[in-house]
Amino acid sequence: MSFQPLKDKVAVVTGASSGMGRAIALRLAEKGAKIICCDLRAEANPSGYENDISTTTVDLITASGGIAVFEKVDISAVSEVEGTFSRTISQFHRLDILINCAGYWAPFRDFANEDDELWAKMSAINTLGTARAMRLAIRQFLKQEFDPIWGSRGRIVNISSCAAVVAFPGEVAYSATKASVNHMTRAGALDHAKDSININCVAPGVVATGMARQNIEDADILALMQKSTPWPRIGRAGDIAGVTVFLCLPDSQWMTGQVLAVDGGLTLGVAP
Ligand SMILES: NC(=O)c1ccc[n+]([C@@H]2O[C@H](COP(=O)([O-])OP(=O)(O)OC[C@H]3O[C@@H](n4cnc5c(N)ncnc54)[C@H](O)[C@@H]3O)[C@@H](O)[C@H]2O)c1
């Protein structure tokens, strides 16, 4: 068995059934963490690109000898999120890592065609859902001892988007709520650095997941995305998982409040 630097750590991963959240949950489990897989449903998004799409994340982890449980939760529902955290603490007696990966995106439309309903849903999931889970995790971290080998009392990694930094046509509400994730990362990290709690963020570019399939299958949108991405390919869920897991390892213990673009260079400027 490979070295497991996160042995005995307990991780809540939201959006764990599909795409990036699934890839992150699997890699954290490989590193030895026990995973609470949180999602609307246990089954993967059927539009996803996973080779093993018909097997749930929990089943994949347990088949590899890891420990994982599924929690059905809508991160925009206060009581459901609180229930998930309290069941996690009752069952595993601690919490060490929170990955906020669940997010909501809606097909492109001009700003003038957005409405309050769209903004309310985007805000409830992307902004309030992320902030709520962060607060609940931090409150639990504060009850636990600093781990001198890990160099930390707890880790949070939020998943935002390149759209939080550069403007894309047709996604004002999404961009604004993802920008809020970037900034709650920085501001939250500032408040809790003194507590040895690391709060960082990964901002993906275009990644082949179920969420992005309708864009990838639209030849015009795909061409725009490829043109905007200097690297010769668009992203894979594993690209995001590798960096996210690094932010949970002892090697990153002195990093906090950072937003790491993992985007094939999309946010660098105008691609030649
Ligand atoms: N795919 C991209 O190109 C891209 C780019 C930038 C950022 N992102 C962000 O990455 C994150 C992961 O998305 P993905 O591309 O892996 O998509 P995905 O559809 O493969 O996975 C998202 C998962 O989140 C779950 N989810 C959605 N709303 C939820 C809620 N309210 N409560 C609990 N779970 C919920 C879904 O059921 C799904 O399993 C999202 O936050 C998304 O905004 C995606």
Image (spheres, rainbow, N blue to C red):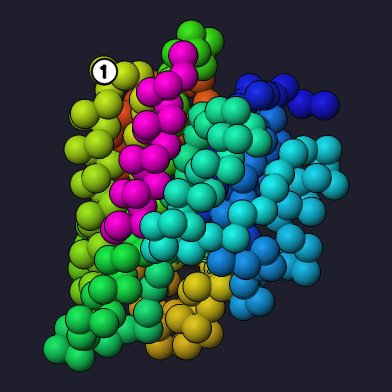
Furthest residue in direction left, as rendered: 112
Using residue 77 as the reference point, say whether residue 185 is left or right of it. Answer: left
The percent coordinates of residue 156 (x first, y second) are 41, 37
* Number of marks present in the image shown: 1
Residue type indicated by callout 1? Lys
Quadrant of the rendered structure where residue 38 is? bottom right
Q: Looking at the image, is 123 positioned above or below residue 179? A: below
Q: Residue shown at 64%/32% (left/top)?
A: 92
Quadrant of the rendered structure where residue 165 is? bottom left
The residue indicated by pointer 1 is: 194
Q: Residue shown at 51%/29% (left/top)?
A: 96
Using residue 25 as the reference point, say whether residue 265 is left or right of it. Answer: left
Furthest residue in direction top, as rendered: 148
Q: How would you classify the magenta stretch by its main secondary structure?
A: helix
The percent coordinates of residue 168 (x first, y second) are 25, 73
* Bounds of the magenta segment: 127-145
Q: Looking at the image, is 119 positioned above or below residue 263? A: below
Q: Residue shown at 67%/53% (left/top)?
A: 70
Q: Is mark 1 within 8 Å of ligand 1?
A: no
The percent coordinates of residue 232 (x first, y second) are 48, 62
Using residue 205 as the reference point, say whether residue 170 is left or right of it. Answer: left
Viewer can see residue 35? yes
- Can you say which quadrant of the picture contains the C terminus? bottom left
Viewer can see residue 205? no
* Residue 168 drawn in magenta: no
Q: Secondary structure at mark 1?
A: helix
Q: Residue shown at 82%/26% (left/top)?
A: 1
The percent coordinates of residue 123 (x first, y second) are 27, 66
Which of these two is toward me, 219 or 72? 72
* Residue 130 drawn in magenta: yes
Which of these two is toward me, 156 or 170? 156
